[in-house]
Image: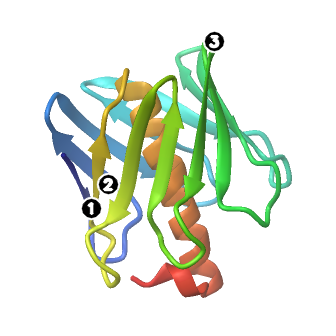
Amino acid sequence: MIECKPLGICSWDYTVTGEDVTATVSFNSFGESGSLNINGKRYSVEKKGAFDPEWTLRLGRDTIATASKESVFTRSFDIQYGSSNYSLKAISAFSREMHLKGNGRNVIYSPKHAFTRRAQIRGSWENKEVLLFGFYLAVLIWRRSANSGGAAAAG
């Protein structure tokens, strides 16, 4: 299990530690872009535009993975990493838990309880880049919900 701790009580930035992962997940002050620092390597997460539903994970100039949303009304993403496809979806309409699956792997991102931003990652994964890009996108959904006053935003 991997522990995800927010950097502050009102922060959406995280430190992620456990097993063979040490990382930080950071959002820019404005917009939905940010960065991942995974075991000392800095990746950027870029969103094309305010109304473009696509995010790109980059290491330098290289595109590592992309994620897209089919609709602004769903809590799901399709992730492309090389030739592998993954899906990230809310487990239920009433939960903040998110499920990443693909390539024979299953990962669950879940808050510790209803009134916290602390989270954990459980499951099996192939690589840390997809694992943490998925976590970034899960936090993005939680952040959007909290900013809109959504019912699933608790905490």
Residue reaching furthest to the front: 104
Find disc 1 in the rendering and name its residue: 7
Say which of marks 3 and 2 sits in front.
3
Asked whether the viewer can see residue 119, the reply is: yes
Secondary structure type for disc 2: strand
Q: Which residue is under mark 3? A: 83
**76 vs 15, nearest the viewer:** 76
Q: Is residue 81 above or below residue 51?
A: above
**Residue 118 in the image, given as x and y percentages of width and height:** 27, 67
Instruction: Please determine whether, in this image, residue 36 is positioned above or below residue 109.
Output: above
How far is mark 1 from mark 2, CA to CA? 5 Å
Residue type for callout 3: Ser
> Relative to 14, does residue 16 appear above or below in the rendering?
above
Report, in whole angstroms, how far the alpha carbon at label 1 lies from the one at label 3.
Answer: 34 Å
**Residue at (27% x, 38% y) in the render:** 23
Q: Secondary structure at mark 1?
A: loop
Label 1 packing within 10 angstroms: few (<14), some (14-19), many (20+): some
